[in-house]
Image (cartoon, coloured by chain):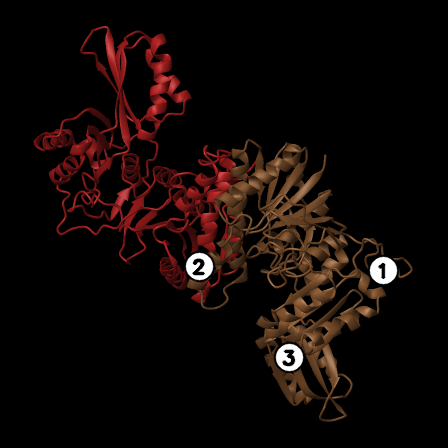
Chain colours: A brown, B red
Amino acid sequence: MSLIVQKFGGSSVSDAEGVKRVAQRVVDTKNQGNDVVVVVSAMGDTTDDLLDLAQQVTTKSGPSRELDMLLTAGERISMAVLAMAIHELGAPAQSFTGSQAGMITDGVHGAARLVEVRPDRIRDSLENGNIAIVAGFQGMNRQTRDITTLGRGGSDTTAVALASALDADYCEIYSDVDGVFTADPRIVSAAHKLNEVSSEEMLEMAANGAKILHLRCVEYARRFKIKLHVRSSFSDLEGTWVIPTESDGDAPDLTKEIPLEQPLISGVAHDRTQAKVTIVDVPDVPGYASKIFGSLNDAKINLDMIVQNVSTRSESRTDISFTLPQDQGDAAIEVLKGVQAEIGFADIEYNDAIGKLSLVGAGMKSNPGVSFHFFDALSSAGVNIDMISTSEIRISVITRADLLDAAVRAVHTAFDLDAEGEATVYGGTGR
Amino acid sequence: MSLIVQKFGGSSVSDAEGVKRVAQRVVDTKNQGNDVVVVVSAMGDTTDDLLDLAQQVTTKSGPSRELDMLLTAGERISMAVLAMAIHELGAPAQSFTGSQAGMITDGVHGAARLVEVRPDRIRDSLENGNIAIVAGFQGMNRQTRDITTLGRGGSDTTAVALASALDADYCEIYSDVDGVFTADPRIVSAAHKLNEVSSEEMLEMAANGAKILHLRCVEYARRFKIKLHVRSSFSDLEGTWVIPTESDGDAPDLTKEIPLEQPLISGVAHDRTQAKVTIVDVPDVPGYASKIFGSLNDAKINLDMIVQNVSTRSESRTDISFTLPQDQGDAAIEVLKGVQAEIGFADIEYNDAIGKLSLVGAGMKSNPGVSFHFFDALSSAGVNIDMISTSEIRISVITRADLLDAAVRAVHTAFDLDAEGEATVYGGTGR
C-alpha cells in the first residue's frame, strides 16, 4: 500500500463539477489500495473575490494578519466541499485546516515560511480509514497562534511538505496542464511534454519562468527528496515525473557519462514579469556594490540577474544592471535615489518592456557547443540580447519583450525540441 | 471604562457599505472610552451561497462535520473584513475564530451547545488595546478539536456567552429592527417599540414567535444575568433593554406590587411555523400518553403546546392534540403510525394551516381580567380558537392561519398597545 499526496489547484476545483471530478479521482486512487492525502487550493476565483472585498473596505494594504484570516476562508470552503463530494461517492473523508494539519510557520503574514510540520491529526485520520483533505497555502504562527498564509506557490509547498513529513511514496501536483513541457505550448505549438526531468533542471526552469511548478515547491521537493508527478486533473494521461537528483548540493560528477536516454536539453523557459534597472556611471571605488545591494536587500527587494559592464563614458566608472519583479520596481528606484548622493552615480534607468528566456538542461554543462548554438539561433531570429547570465545547467538572456515569443520559438526549434503535432493548452494556473 | 459586547447580524454587514457602517459604530464606542468586543455573523447571503454550493456536490444531507467546516468560512470572511475596515479608521482590531476565542462546545455538529467559554486570547487582545472581533455561531468540540456550529441563534448566543465570560457591562444585539415591539410592525402598523422588557417576558415572546432575539440567547442572558440592548445598526436610536429579572427560577413574588411604570402587557407575539397534529380516539387507559410522547421524544421531535380533550365519539376515549415545527410533521406522523396498532387509536390528523398568537406580560399573572379581555377581543374579530395554553405571564392560542393577522391586530388594539404613527419596518434577520 502506498501513501500518495495529491494536490489540486484552483483551476481543478473551479466549480462544483470540478470538485466532483477531483473527488472521483481521489476515490479511484483510494480504491486502488492507497492511502490518500489531498491538498486543495481555493476554488477558482474565490481568492480574487475575497481580495476585491478587502479592497472595498480599505484604501491601504490593510492589516496582513486580517488579510491572511480572510484569504484562508477560500481553502476552508474548497476542502469542506471536496470532503462532501467524496462522502457522496461513499468514501469517508475529513478536512483539516493548515493549523489542524500541523503546518507550523513563522510570523510573516502573506509569505510565511514553514518551520515545522506536525501532521498528527492527518496520521490519525488516515489510520481510521479516511481520506484526509488539507487546506493548502495556510499555516499557524507558533508564537502567536495566528493564522498565516504561505504566499505564492503555497499550496504546492503544503503538499510537498506534507509528503515529506508523512513519508509519502510520492506527491502528485494536479493542474490544468498535462505536465512539464519543453516550452510554453501557448507560444511554441510544437512544444512537447517531458516524461521525466531532474529536480535540479526543474529548479532552473521554475526559477526562470516556467509556471507549472513554483520554485519554492521544487526546492522543497529537491531538498527532501520527494518524487513529484506533475499532471492534469482533466485527463488520465501520465504527466511529468520530477525526480530528486542524487548529488544535491555536491559538485556535479563530470566523469559520469550522460545516459543515452537523457536529453541534452530539457526545455525553454520564459518570464515576462521582470524589469531591468541600470545604474549609470557608478564611481568604480571599493564598497559601492555592497552599498547598493545592501540597501536593496534591506528593502526586501528580490534581485534576479545582476550584470556589471564597463561604462562607455569613463574608464573609472561602471554601469550596473539588474533584473527584479516588475511590482518591486518603484520600491527599488526609491531605495536607489536614497543612496544616489552618497554613492555618486549619474542616473537610474528603468525598463519593464523586457523578457527573459532560459535554456535549461543537465546535458548542457558538458557540451561547449550549446552556447554557440543558442546565441546563433537568437541572432538568426533577429533577437538582440541585453543581458546574459549562466549556471551549470542554464543560459538566460534578457531580450526586448516584443521579441520574446519569437526568441522562444527559435531556440526551441534550434535544439530539436519540436514535437510532431500540437500540444494541448488549457488556461490559467492556481495558487 | 465599560466593557461592551456588540453583536452584528448578517443584515447589518450585508455588503462593504454595511461593514464600514458597523466599523464606524464600533470605533465610536471604543473612542467613548470603552473596551469593545464585537461578535459578527456571516455577511448577507454568504451562508445561503455556501449551502447552495454544498447542495451542488451532494444529494444527501452531507457529513455534518464538513458542513460546519464549510459554513464557518462565512464568519471568517466577515470578521476579517470588519477588522480591516476598523483599521482603516485608525483603530487596532484583531479577529478571532470561535475556536481561537475559546468557545468550547459538545460534538453535535450543526447544533452544538457551549460547554465552556475560555476567552483568554480575547482578554489579551483587549489588554493590548485592540478591538477584539469574534466569529459568531461557531465553536470547537473539546474532545475531537473539530469545528462546530451552534445552530439557530448561534451568533446571539456567542455574544451573550462572551459577555458573561468576560464580565461585560452589557451586550448590544444589533439588527435591522429598532428594538422589541409590542407586535410585528409588518402586521400591526401601530405597534410600538418597548424601552424595557424583563428577560422573563422576553423569553416568553421569543418562545412564542417574536423573532428579534432567539430563545436560546434570551435563556442564556436570563440565566447569567446579562443586560441586553436590542437595537438597530441603521440608526442611533436607543433600542429595547432586556433586563434580567431578580427572582429567576423562583416563584414570582405576588405580594410585591407591580411598579406603576411596568405595563400590564408587553406585547403580542405570533408564529406561523407550527403545525397541529391530532391523535383521534385514543383508548383512555393508563400509559398511552407516555407511549406516545416517549416515542416522539425518542425521535427528537420538539413538541410545543399539548392539549387533551374528551373525545366526542366515546366516553372511554380521548383526543390528543399537539403543535410542533412544520418541518418535523412528516417525522412525527411516521412515529405515530409506528405505534398506532400497539396503542389502538383511530386516526392521525395533520394541519399546518395554523397560526399561534401569544399575549405576553408580567402584569398578567395578577390580573384575572386579562383572559376575559383577550378572548373577548378574538371573538369580536371573528377568530375561532383551536387550542389554548397558558403560563404565568402568557396566554397562547392556535387559530386558522388566514385569521392570524387579524387576530394579532385585534388583541394589540384591545390591550391599548397601539402607538401614534406607524413603526419603521426593515426586512430580514440574520442568524
Report the residue marked by disc 2. Answer: A53
Q: Earlier in the sequence, mark 1 or mark 3?
A: 1
Q: Is residue A423 above or below residue A304?
A: above
> What amino acid is found at the position of numbered circle 1 in the picture?
Asp
Q: Earlier in the sequence, mark 3 or mark 2?
A: 2
- Give the label on residue A323, or none: none
Instruction: Categorize mark 2 by other alpha carbons within 10 Å: few (<14), some (14-19), many (20+).
Output: some
Left or right side of B151 for A66: right
Left or right side of B335 for B422: left
x and y percent of residue A12 in the render? Answer: 56, 49
- Give the label on residue A250, or none: 1
In terms of depth relative to the viewer, which is nearer, B15 or A323? A323
User: Label 1, label 3: how many angstroms apart (C-alpha)?
Assistant: 33 Å
Instruction: Categorize mark 1 by other alpha carbons within 10 Å: few (<14), some (14-19), many (20+).
Output: few
Looking at the picture, do discs 1 and 2 lie on one chain?
yes
Q: Is residue B224 above or below residue B46?
A: above
- Give the label on residue A277, or none: 3
Q: Secondary structure at mark 2?
A: helix
**Total count of labels:** 3
Residue name at image x 67 percent, y 36 percent:
A35
Left or right side of B322 for B190: left
Tag 2 subunit: A
Residue name at image x 16 percent, y 32 percent:
B367
Q: Quadrant of the N terminus of chain B?
A: bottom left
Instruction: Categorize mark 3 by other alpha carbons within 10 Å: few (<14), some (14-19), many (20+).
Output: many
In terms of depth relative to the viewer, which is nearer, B263 or A333? A333
User: Label 3, label 2: how many angstroms apart (C-alpha)?
Assistant: 34 Å
In terms of depth relative to the viewer, which is nearer, B308 or A232? A232
